[in-house]
Amino acid sequence: MATTNYLQLDKQLCFALYSTSLAMTKLYKPLLEKLGLTYPQYLVMLILWERDGLALKDIAEQLHIDSGALTPVIKRLEALGFLHRQRLPDNERTLEIGLTPAGKTLREQAQEIPLHIGMACATGEAEINALREQLQQLRKNLTRA
């Protein structure tokens, strides 16, 4: 009777996710360099292009990271002229992040990125959607664990 050796690298779900994430980030790198963005900066811009004028804590929540880890990314995007930060007059503790005109214009330049990534995946839209949903469910399960 054969037993499966689960301590092999190619049997590890974590390594499959990690190495796939590295490959995906590597694919994004030259596309984002044309925009002057890093991958984490791109993620912030995606959120703001969808809904401008969010609190820092709301952006951090959507990215599933601590707002303290996000602050350097936000400051760099501000230095690049793509967004601005301001304290809300009625709540000094809330830091609102908004797009500048340059940040809004950058959206147009980024339009082709998802298409390029989709083509590189060499699979259909339905399969990509199903995989994304499975990964989102996996993240929820792991967060609860």
Image (tube, rainbow, N blue to C red):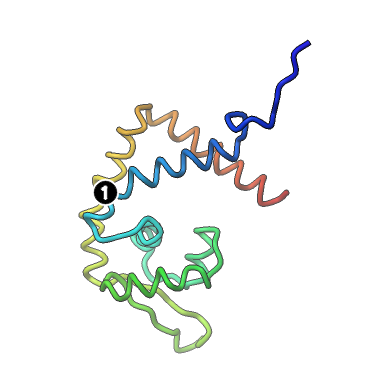
Residue at numbered disc 1 = 30
Q: Residues within 10 Å of mark 1 (few under 14, many from 20)?
A: few
| In the foreground, 124 or 34 | 34
Q: Residue 69 at x, y = what percent?
A: 51, 68
| Rendered residue at 26%/49% (across/down) | 31
Q: Nearer the viewer, residue 42 or 89?
A: 42
* 11 lies above or below 35: above
What amino acid is labelled 1 in the image? Pro
70 sits to left or right of 120? right
Percent of width and height locating residue 63: 50, 58
State the residue at coordinates (37%, 27%): 124
The image quadrant of residue 138 is top right
Q: Which quadrant, please, contains the N terminus?
A: top right
SS type, badge 1: helix
44 and 79: which one is in front? Answer: 79
Image vertical order of residue 37 relative to residue 55, above or below:
above
Number of dots carrying numbers: 1
| Position of residue 34 in the picture relative to residue 85 (left or right) | left
Q: Residue furthest top?
A: 1
Give the quarter of the image for residue 126. Answer: top left
**Residue drawn at (33%, 47%) of the image:** 28
Q: Residue furthest right?
A: 1
Q: Position of residue 45 (x, y in %)?
A: 35, 61
- When the figure is inspected, residue 73 is found, relative to residue 134, above or below; the finding is below
